[in-house]
Amino acid sequence: MIRRLVGTALAAGALVTTAPLAAAADPILPLSEVRTGMVGEARTVVTGTTIERFPVRVLGVQRLGATPGGTLILVRAEGPLITPIGVAEGMSGSPVYITGPDGVQRVIGAIAFGTGDEGGLVVGVTPIESMISSARLGGVPLGARENARPSAAAPALPIRRATLVDGRAAALRWERRHPERRALYPLRRWMIGGASSPVLGPLARALRAQGIRATAAPAAQSPVEAPLVPGASMSALLSAGDLSVGAIGTVTYVDGRTVLGFGHPFLGAGASRFLLAGGDITTTIAAPLNDSSYKLGVPTGLRGMIVGDRTDGIVGRIGGVAGITATSRAIDRDRKTDLTARSTLAPDRRALALLAPIVQGEPAFAVRDGIEGGTLRLTITVRSRALRRPLVYRNVYAAAGDVISLANGELARITTVLGQNGVRSIPISSIDVVQTLERRVRAARIQSARLRPRRARAGQRVRLDLVVADWRGPLRRIRRTVRLPRDLPPGPVTLRVVANGSGGFDGALAPLDGELEDAAAPVSARRALRAVNRRARALTGTRTERLVAAVQSTGPRRNDAVRILLPGEFADDPNVGIAVPVGTVISGGRAVVRASIR
């Protein structure tokens, strides 16, 4: 038996480490007082949790646009610590300090953007007043007013136009074509721990479309804790525990329980509910010439919530953690393997949309140790304080090639419907997923059927004799007892027996690239959302009652059952017919049954 234990304490409840807070926020030096040639220092972590310092020299100002985040201070990093490495992804948020004539160190902003500089030493700094103003609610942000100042009040620095690009390669190409201009890109890279490469692929592609590179990292949570002070590592997470998904950056500014960092967006989500943690840097990978350097690390204990994700950086609040407890278990009966992954998920619908396929798919892939066919029995239980009882989904899937992918869209569908429907958003408190796998493909097609006795009364219990053809197997007889409807009129009646579900079997071979398919899940979630909204409008009751009834009536029907249709009933109507479980996935076929009602 294999069990994952790391992160159990996280999933069991909100793990919050109380660390010393800064007595007072650092003094700031506004953009208007920054001058070319000023020499200061930046603070960051290169290994472990120790904050180190390296010199920086102010080169000028780059203007991206008249919006918050549109003005950046250009600096050159210097010194023996940083020259061999270059400024690395993960150093975003590193505060830059200038010491004034009075001997007081003042922060001017956060290192946040790389350029096409081949040594990775020329970087863009987000002004600190822009980051502070982005953390405030309401009114015109100070950063916007700073950028909109008349030229007489502009900072006494050389100002040049710059272009925002997706990454280092694009910056290099742009600056070769336009040597008079700078191209800047956010210094961001996500660390994903606890996900196998076949499961990680779809998430990595989704992040790459937003200009974010993802790197596999250790799944363990570091036991080391350090206070969240300027220069320390901080993590913005979608998930913590056995599944760790998010980015490690640097704390820029602390004011009481408010923590500012990164200097650029995490996901650009605006008001958000992501997880805030510290960080422990395993090592800093030095690749300043051919690609870019980056920090490789793991998050430490949860410390609070990321409540703002804006152009000028992220805003965290140290304190309670409002996470979703997720437990996902998979059992392979043939290999005798059993794995349970426990994580805390950010209670943000954007996070759930990205994480659901991994939460469901990773344990199943891990116990199977590959993509194979077979049969998968799935149970998903979702709990919420808004629901009187848990919402439970059960189904069975069979496939010749990739049975894990066939079932893997269901958690995404359920969480999307609960969080994004047009009736009421249901806050999820916990998710439990149990999947049982076996190599045998338990799928069959209907060949024929009859009722015993053929003459019966309305409401009487009768026997359904069903003949099915097993997939790559012989004919087989299945007998089940059913009760006829009480409102059947006397006389002859013709009943039809059809497959209850339509998506429970796939006869195709597994993909050769060894990656779980991900195309069906988003489509299924969007279709389910539209169906739930339509169904809920036609029901009566409270909003919660209508939503739960709509979710239950519009979800995929049990694949391991047949449905007996009465005259005038149609197979595409989920609310008609008599569902009869038969213990195997029914992939198609139909039969006609004639009876006489006394």
Image: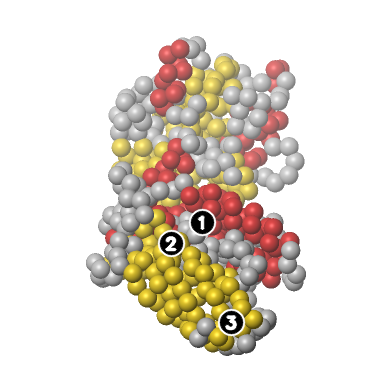
**Callout 3 crowding tier (Cα within 10 Å): few <14, some 14–19, many ≥20:** some
Query: At label 2, which amino acid type do we have?
Result: Ser
Residue at left offset 50%, top offset 86%: 453
Residue at left offset 44%, top offset 78%: 465
Q: Nearer the viewer, residue 22 or 268?
A: 268
Inter-mark Cα distance, 3 to 1: 45 Å
Residue at left offset 60%, top offset 47%: 308
Report x, y in % for residue 396: 43, 67
Occupied quadrant, residue 455: bottom right
Q: In what quadrant of the picture does the N terminus appear? A: bottom left
Circle 2 SS class: strand
Circle 3 SS class: strand
Report x, y in % for residue 17: 46, 62
Q: Nearer the viewer, mark 3 or mark 1?
A: 3
Q: Which of marks 3 and 2 is nearer the N terminus?
A: 2
Left or right for 15, reference 437: right
- The residue tagged 2 is 587
Q: Which of marks 3 and 1 is nearer the N terminus?
A: 1
The reply to whether discs 3 and 1 touch (Cβ–Cβ < 8 Å) is: no
Q: Which of 72 and 578 is in front in this view?
A: 578
Instruction: State whether residue 439 is above or below residue 34.
Output: below
Query: At label 3, which amino acid type do we have?
Result: Ser
Q: Which mark is residue 412?
A: 1
- The residue tagged 3 is 596
Circle 1 SS class: helix
Residue lying furthest left: 335
Q: Which of marks 2 and 1 is in front?
A: 2
Instruction: State whether residue 470 is above or below residue 279.
Output: below
Report x, y in % for residue 246: 45, 48
